[in-house]
């Protein structure tokens, strides 16, 4: 039976070793792998031995992960998201001799925005975004009723500020802070919030609402066994009334997308909205892949306005997937595990053919970090 590597964050590995649950459903990898004729080997870059040929792999025994020294698998699904230099260096080394998909990529939101902007077919779905300066914030406040100030590199809503204009006053809303300022005070407060860090200013899209609260949509976009980008699932994330953030880690909640769309659109309109979101998401994935060929598993946050027009809010290169579980969309949740495993099987099959026909050839799919 072929082995496929599943490279996981250190904390997830430690949870699995203890037999504790995490956002990664390790038994899904095992179950789906068995159906596809593959055995998953779980590890973190720290587990790779010097020389890069052997790894202290971990195998699921039904209740927890147990270690065993084995050869590094020929195909690896990278689920690690880290800024640790040693771990990233190990991933780069593995990428030279193994097929590592979802390798190291640029996570800087401004650079991603610039990459996507190069495709004219995508521009209509990108909110106006620029690097933060007090002067740029002034301009955005003149043009838009709602503005976001967000870190250039970040996740789960940490550090994000929503600014709303109410007459001559401005509400400054962060995860643990809500204040009202004059414009002059607001700009000074925003500059203090940013400090010397790299932040962006982004147009606030007039998002559609569910039960009076705005929502966005998590779209899982993955490569399947035919190596084509496909949408594995869509789920609505409803914002927390206090901080206006939809991130589940910041108090948002997940509901089935059909439940959020039903009060807003007819059945036919819902189908059109969903289809448009899927088309845009796949086009964005293809454009991102032009720059990073190893990409195969993305989680996009997209919003729609009251007319159903989609906007990209953010691209996540390590979709944690649990929003599908929280919404009760268990078939979609499992699909987000199946497609990467099917993709891994197709890569293993190609490498097998390569061994028989071109024994000296090597193919690297990993992105640049």
Image (spheres, helix red, strand yellow):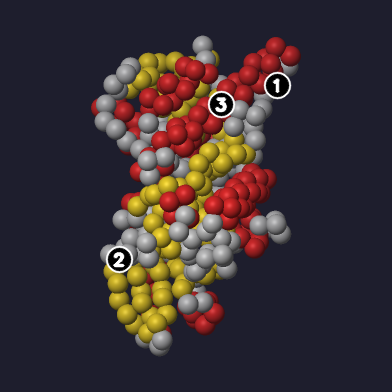
- The residue lying at 54 percent from left, 31 percent from top is 339
Residue wearing tag 2: 242
The answer to which of 350 and 169 lies nearer the viewer is 169
Q: Is residue 176 above or below residue 232?
A: below
Q: Which residue is mark 3?
A: 342
Q: CA distance from mark 3 to mark 2?
A: 41 Å
Q: Residues within 10 Å of mark 3 (few under 14, many from 20)?
A: many
Task: Tell me which residue sits at (38%, 44%) in the image.
Answer: 327
Q: Position of residue 127 (x, y in %)?
A: 56, 65
Q: Residues within 10 Å of mark 1 (few under 14, many from 20)?
A: few
Instruction: Confirm whether residue 229 shows in the render.
Output: yes
Q: Is residue 108 visible?
A: no
Describe the element under mark 3 as helix, strand or loop: helix
Residue depth check, mark 1 versus mark 2: number of the one nearer the observer: 2
Looking at the image, residue 176 sits to the left or right of residue 56; the answer is left
User: What residue would you read off at disc 1?
Assistant: 361
- Image coordinates for residue 226, horizontal then vertical, percent: 65, 29
Horizontal side, residue 73 vs residue 245: left or right: right
Who comes first in sequence, dot 1 or dot 2?
Answer: 2
Q: In front: mark 1 or mark 3? A: 3
Question: CB under 8 Å between callouts 1 and 2?
Answer: no
Residue found at x 38% / y 49%: 254
Residue at x-position 43% and y-position 63%? 209
Query: Which SS class for mark 2?
Result: loop
Q: Earlier in the sequence, mark 1 or mark 3?
A: 3
Q: What is the quadrant of residue 70 in the picture? A: top left
Where in the figure is residue 37, as x and y percent of width and height?
Answer: 52, 15
Q: Residue furthest bottom?
A: 168
Query: How would you rate the neighbour count of disc 2 (Cα within 10 Å): few for under 14, some for 14-19, many for 20 or more?
Result: some
């Amino acid at each position: 039976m072929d082995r496929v590597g599943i490279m996981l964050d250190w904390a997830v590995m430690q949870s699995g070793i203890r037999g504790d649950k995490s956002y990664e459903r390790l038994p899904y990898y095992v179950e789906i792998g068995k159906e596809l004729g593959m055995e998953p080997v779980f590890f973190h870059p720290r587990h790779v031995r010097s020389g890069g040929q052997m790894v202290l792999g971990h195998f699921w025994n039904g209740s927890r992960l147990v270690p065993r020294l084995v050869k590094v698998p020929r195909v690896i699904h990278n689920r690690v998201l880290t800024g640790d230099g040693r771990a990233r260096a190990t991933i780069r080394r593995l990428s030279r001799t193994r097929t590592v998909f979802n390798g190291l990529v640029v996570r800087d939101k401004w650079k991603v925005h610039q990459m996507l902007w190069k495709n004219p077919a995508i521009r209509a779905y990108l909110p106006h975004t620029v690097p933060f300066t007090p002067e740029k914030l002034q301009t955005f406040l003149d043009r838009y009723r709602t503005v976001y100030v967000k870190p250039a590199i970040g996740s789960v809503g940490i550090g994000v500020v929503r600014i709303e204009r109410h007459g001559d006053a401005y509400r400054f809303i962060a995860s643990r802070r809500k204040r009202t300022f004059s414009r002059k005070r607001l700009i000074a407060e925003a500059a203090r919030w940013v400090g010397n860090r790299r932040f962006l200013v982004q147009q606030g899209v007039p998002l559609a609402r569910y039960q009076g609260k705005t929502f966005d949509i998590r779209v899982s976009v993955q490569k399947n066994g035919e190596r084509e980008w496909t949408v594995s699932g869509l789920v609505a994330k409803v914002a927390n009334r206090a901080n206006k953030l939809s991130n589940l880690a910041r108090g948002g909640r997940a509901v089935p997308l059909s439940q959020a769309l039903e009060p807003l659109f007819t059945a036919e309109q819902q189908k059109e909205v969903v289809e448009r979101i899927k088309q845009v998401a796949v086009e964005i994935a293809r454009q991102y892949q032009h720059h990073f060929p190893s990409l195969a598993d993305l989680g996009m946050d997209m919003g729609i306005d009251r007319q159903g027009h989609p906007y990209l809010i953010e691209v996540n290169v390590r979709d944690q997937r649990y929003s599908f579980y929280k919404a009760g969309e268990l078939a979609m949740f499992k699909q987000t595990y199946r497609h990467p495993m099917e993709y891994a099987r197709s890569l293993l099959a190609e490498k097998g053919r390569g061994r028989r026909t071109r024994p000296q050839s090597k193919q690297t799919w990993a992105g640049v970090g």
